[in-house]
Image (spheres, rainbow, N blue to C red):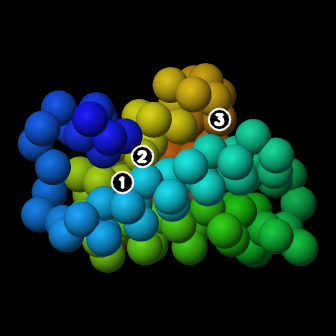
Amino acid sequence: MGLLENLFGGGLPRMSAEQRREAERLIEDLIGVGRTDDFLSERPGGQFNAQCHNLRARAIGKRLHEIGGLPLMMAAYRKVKKRLGANLGAHLEYAWDKIGDWSA
């Protein structure tokens, strides 16, 4: 069973096999972003937008929303929180504010 099957417990949104593989890669990339750069910053600039949100994390969130909507974003959030802890999970929650149906 793959990452997404584990996250959804078999209740995956309608996605092709290619979309599932892409989503799994994006979630692993997102975990790497959180681990190395964090999802929020105290100051804008560089890899952070004017709201101090990580640009790569937001791009990943937007793509996850395109692929699987809010359910896929929630699964990714839960995976990040599990792997990186509640603090970085909360940072991701704020970094994704207003992406699709996501609201911090």
Name the amino acid type tagged 3: Leu
Between the C-alphas of marks 2 and 1, the distance is: 5 Å
- Structural distance between the alpha carbons of marks 3 and 2: 13 Å
Helix, strand or loop under label 2: helix
Q: Is residue 20 visible?
A: yes
Q: Amino acid at mark 1?
A: Met
Percent position of residue 32, x then y: 70, 48
44 horizontally vs 30: left or right? right
Query: Are dots 2 and 1 in contact, CB under 8 Å?
Result: yes
Whole-angstrom CA distance, mark 3 to mark 1, is: 15 Å
Q: Position of residue 30 (x, y in %)?
A: 60, 53
**Number of numbered labels in the structure image:** 3
Name the residue: 74% across, 73% down: 49
Name above or below for residue 37 compared with residue 50.
Answer: above
Could you say which is closer to the camera, residue 91 or residue 60? Answer: 60
> Which element is circle 3 on?
helix
* Foreground residue among 79 and 10: 10
Marks 3 and 1, the one that precedes in the sequence: 1
Disc 1 designates what residue?
A: 73
Residue type (three-letter) at the residue carrying disc 2: Ala
In the image, taking residue 36 as reference, residue 67 lies left or right, namely left
The residue at which mark 2 appears reads as 76
Q: Residues within 10 Å of mark 1 (few under 14, many from 20)?
A: many
Nearer to me, 36 or 4: 4
Q: Quadrant of residue 35?
A: top right
For residue 12, above or below residue 14: above
Residue 100 vs residue 99: left or right? left
The residue that mark 3 highlights is 88
State whether residue 99 appears in this view. Answer: no
